Amino acid sequence: MSKLVRVNMSTKEVQIQEVPEQYAKLGGRALTSQFILDEVEPTCHPLGPQNKLVFAPGMLSGTSAPSSGRLSVGGKSPLTGTIKESNAGGITAQKLANAGIKALIIEGKPQDKGFSVLKITPDSVEILAGDNVAGKGTYETTAILRKEHGAKAAVVSIGPAGEMLMANAGIANSDIEGNSSRYAGRGGLGAVLGSKGIKAIVVDAPGSFNVPLHNPEAFKAAAQKFSQILLSHPVCGTGLPQFGTNVLMNIISEAGALPTRNFSRGRFEQANEIGGEKLAQVAAERGGLATHACHPGCVMRCSNAYPLPDGKVCSPIEYESAWALGAHCEIDSLDVIGTLNYICNDVGLDTIEAGGTLGILMEAGVIPWGDGAAAIKALEEVGQGTPLGRIIGQGAVFTAQAFGVTKVGAVKGQHMPAYDPRSAKGIGVTYATSTMGADHTAGYAIATNILKSGGYVDPLNKEGQVELSRNLQIATAAVDSSGLCLFVAFALLDNPEGLPAVADMLNAQYGLELSVNDILGIGSNVLKVERTFNQRAGFTKEHDRLPEFFYKENLPPHNVAFDISGDELDQTLNF
Amino acid sequence: MSKLVRVNMSTKEVQIQEVPEQYAKLGGRALTSQFILDEVEPTCHPLGPQNKLVFAPGMLSGTSAPSSGRLSVGGKSPLTGTIKESNAGGITAQKLANAGIKALIIEGKPQDKGFSVLKITPDSVEILAGDNVAGKGTYETTAILRKEHGAKAAVVSIGPAGEMLMANAGIANSDIEGNSSRYAGRGGLGAVLGSKGIKAIVVDAPGSFNVPLHNPEAFKAAAQKFSQILLSHPVCGTGLPQFGTNVLMNIISEAGALPTRNFSRGRFEQANEIGGEKLAQVAAERGGLATHACHPGCVMRCSNAYPLPDGKVCSPIEYESAWALGAHCEIDSLDVIGTLNYICNDVGLDTIEAGGTLGILMEAGVIPWGDGAAAIKALEEVGQGTPLGRIIGQGAVFTAQAFGVTKVGAVKGQHMPAYDPRSAKGIGVTYATSTMGADHTAGYAIATNILKSGGYVDPLNKEGQVELSRNLQIATAAVDSSGLCLFVAFALLDNPEGLPAVADMLNAQYGLELSVNDILGIGSNVLKVERTFNQRAGFTKEHDRLPEFFYKENLPPHNVAFDISGDELDQTLNF
């Protein structure tokens, strides 16, 4: 039976509740965002007792639906002040779902300073002492807890960044092999978990795919069909499994949309040195993995495992991480990028924001452009909690303010990912209008602007970008609710049988009769819920804008500025 | 003839313009706020080329009206993101007015990194090299420039904090003796001047009181009458001249409204050690001054000069500074407070925000409560530009975020001054609703809540506080436009002949026929202008709130919380 688990860290009480009717058909982002709107005072301090942190598996998570193991983590973000849903792979969602848990809600705030570990099984929820893991990195924390609680358990953890309540602290989830590298990274929700005095959550359940199904036969047929749809798509079935997301490095640089040296130009001359092809080659040479699944049942297997010169293994190096820690800083070494990425994973930082921040340190002259050793040293200070580390751990906007830098590519306090909004204007609309700050995953217009999935909209021309971003943001909110990996969207955009197959799976699981339009309706409702929260938190259309330099400074090589007006941006989510 | 001076730091061009009709009758805050609304894009980066900094003498400044030498400095604040008018004493306003300048507008942003000095006389405006003063403290900068340009010139300057674009950087103005201690402190406008590449402004004019008058005889009569009104009032004529503003320390502590140890209680057991009576005694013993005028023609003479043990002189130690650097941090030594105050003056920091920030460092455990030596060492790091100094220089909210402190008494990013809003609820309404963040001077409800000027409204009861704050905010905006020191308000509140005398002076100066209602109309219009700017910058009623702990935690000794609801606060400036 599906249930809600509430853990109050003020009183240390655990409540296990039936799922109220209004939440019964929701999952993932639809569920976390609705909970936050219903239960969190929008103007509260994100790190105070009034904020809540909600973990929810997607609607399909815990079934055999391919690539359906995504976890949604929701709360009010200490980085942006907006509502936040941060979406992660790893095995947490499947274990929660198989433990019969629809959502885990963490509320209140302890009076004491120590850290606890939450232990969850299908039959019990316990708050355990966390003294043996407090202060440790996520790799060691995860290893200790897997030793204590069994290697099949999912381990959710924060690093020192989350313990120190840094606004760029993420939440790590273990993968199949127990690496703590699948991040609910963006928006600082690791600091929210830290503010609740929770260092880690262990979720143990016997299976990964045993969630009850209303009609198992129909489900199996739909899941098989959906699997075939994914495997037959050139991105989902070939591109991602071969080189992972970092295959984009050369493509985006070629398109002139790769932000280089803090958004100074759109091409990085050394893109090839840090791209997916090189990564796959070096990983193979060193006995790593060019392809890897972050949770059981993923058919796209876009992850990788990159052995570092010191013997550690960074898994994965994603495209956006390689950009932030690479091209953005004019760093052209995969070994340096992998080392920085490993530090982020261990200390508990979002890689995009961390790389964005290192670029700001370079813009400020605190460390030299392209200096990998200096970047590593600076990033290591985060875990040490030095004053410089305290600055870096708060993200790019904060660091820019500390050092008097006015050129920072962020919206609502969150740094942009790996696509310049001037030469990929659709993603610029998404950055500006997303309910949670600059976020490529909120409406991945690169698919249509550059990869030509779902048609083609010229990335350099403002025409059609608002509509493109709107449709993608709606579809994304639905996918983020389903528990499916967002990368299925390439197949959904190109194959008219994709969304019906998703509807068939949901209907067979829950005994529903959802149409494709109903699914998109879930997406648009999620956006309405999130915008309502943000408005009540004090956000207005004036916050749905890009930083002024994108409108004033042209980006080489196409020498274009961002030219979509405020009035036009305001039409994006005006429904 | 009155003129506008525009200095464009992008092009290094100077324009001297006639005053457009719509600005001819404005001065001080009315003029700076109208300029900012008319000419500054509200969503611009406060430290970017689109922000402007406006210096305007008050309407009466440069005449012989008593205590009329106040300067308004306006811009978009890097601390709050709102419009800002920061109001200062010293001789700048009188010198600008006597040079025939209605407003000095600094715009643009230089490409190069160096600093300039602006030299203004009645006949010329020059941009000079500032290499000989760049990097220096305000005391030395002012001394060098007075030596170069004459001891009668006013010197406006920023310290290293402003050069480093810190959000708590203020703008120093020299007083009669050439001390750089009269601050346009609040809101970080020193960083705006720094962003324009201007280290200092020298204003030289032959006289202090020679502004042309429409009817000199009528003016003289009105000014004499106003002077008598001030001198016969117990606060303006006796209290302030005797002990200065710091006479409040014991009074506010006794009232249970003195925020102690970061708003943990409302009385400081050592208040007497840091109050005005002790200050006057020690100053006299050491050959300092218990009373002092910050500009020629001031009859209230509330300033002081406190000799420090090392031979330096801190002038003045204001009540709010002594609170922030004292009771807020549980520091009970005037010598420590004076030393911290001196560092603030020299490095170029607002004392209220700096003291607020030191209290946050103590709350975080970075330095111990009450440890003066540790506080001095930490504050000295600001001028050195260390990472910790970079944090401190950005103010209390920033420092709280860096160190994971959620209890910070600030509104719209600006730290509260020396009155707890729970036991002086009228000032709480002002903090919440002021157009420029937590600011006691925006509507000094302490006058009526505690000092019983203008009647009495029980400070512990919510009744009547909204109306009190509204009326005071309107009157204050008018006083801030007149160039009169806000302290004249005590007399205006109690003596029905006060405002008519102000009207008589303005009418005699400008050939107008303003009524008392017209003057209050200037005030309410200023607030409308400022709220319009803020709304366009993205501020909503959700920002007109106190931090949540004031509603949840009771303050000893009266054990009261702040209980004025959002709907009630929203009525304050709803006109």
Image (tube, coloured by chain):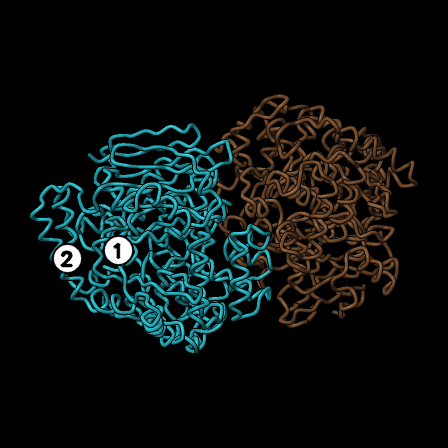
Chain colours: A cyan, B brown
Q: Secondary structure at mark 1?
A: loop
Please say whether residue B511 is visible from this viewpoint. no
Residue B475 numbered mark, or none: none
Nearest the viewer among B479 and A348 is A348
Q: What residue is at 20 percent from the left and 66 percent from the top?
A: A237
- Hey, which quadrant is residue B268 in on the image? top right
Q: Is residue B341 above or below residue B420?
A: below
Which label sits on residue A485?
1
Reading the image, the residue beneath label 2 is: A226
Residue B484 x/y as whole percent: 75, 43
Q: Determine the residue positioned at 80% across, 58% down.
A: B155
Q: Position of residue B142 (x, y in %)?
A: 81, 58
In the image, taking residue B251 as reference, residue A205 lies left or right, namely: left
> Is the N terminus of chain B in the top left, top right, bottom left or bottom right quadrant?
bottom right
For marks 1 and 2 on the same chain, the one whose residue lies earlier in the sequence: 2
Residue type, label 2: Phe
Q: CA distance from mark 1 to mark 2?
A: 13 Å
Residue A213: x and y in percent read 13, 42
